[in-house]
Image (spheres, helix red, strand yellow):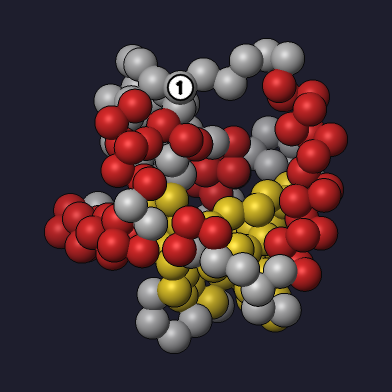
Amino acid sequence: MTFEKTPRGTYGQNIPPFAVPLLKLINPLMLRQARRSKAKPRGLNLVVLTTIGAKSGQRRQTVLGALPDGDNAWIIIASAGGSVTNPAWYHNLAAHPEQAEIEVSGGKHAVTATQLAGDERDDAWQRVLAASPRYAGYEKKTDRHIPLIRLTAS
């Protein structure tokens, strides 16, 4: 399956410009917490996703919720809280789907990213909503089709 990028929406949440530098300061703290924690906020596992920057080529890390999907696979949700745009990590994965890594439960796994579509995406979305009903609210905040990505260990 190819990685076909989902376009931005016409409306949705917007991150205020003043928050961007604050988020960059908080990210290292979130990474450390995710690596230490066994908690399941919003019903999903906390994971650290490492991608290669689409433009910079540099390694980028972000904390996400992930839904286990069988053995050695996880579903991640590019909701960005119902934002009008897709998150930066989504663009990085689309540019380099075979150069990602996930840290989960203390282990690191090289992964390949594929975007789910059709019935497969619909089935996964229902599992996401069952695990974390909050995502239904994100879907209502935007007209953007929220991408679901399967990360499969290489």
Q: Residue at x 29, y 62 (%)?
A: 130
Extreme-bottom residue of the structure: 71
Quadrant occupied by the C terminus? bottom right
Residue placed under numbered mark 1 in the picture: 13
Q: Residue at x 83, y 48 (%)?
A: 28
Q: Does residue 109 sit above or below 26 in this rendering?
A: below
Residue 7 place in picture, x, y as percent: 36, 29
Q: Secondary structure at mark 1?
A: loop
Quadrant occupied by the N terminus? bottom left
Extreme-left residue of the structure: 119
Q: Does residue 110 sit above or below 133 in this rendering?
A: below
Q: Does residue 3 sit above or below 26 in this rendering?
A: below
Does residue 136 show up?
yes
Name the side, left or right, on which 54 lies relative to 133. Answer: right
Q: Residue at x 55, y 49 (%)?
A: 93
Closest to the observer: 61 or 21?
Answer: 21
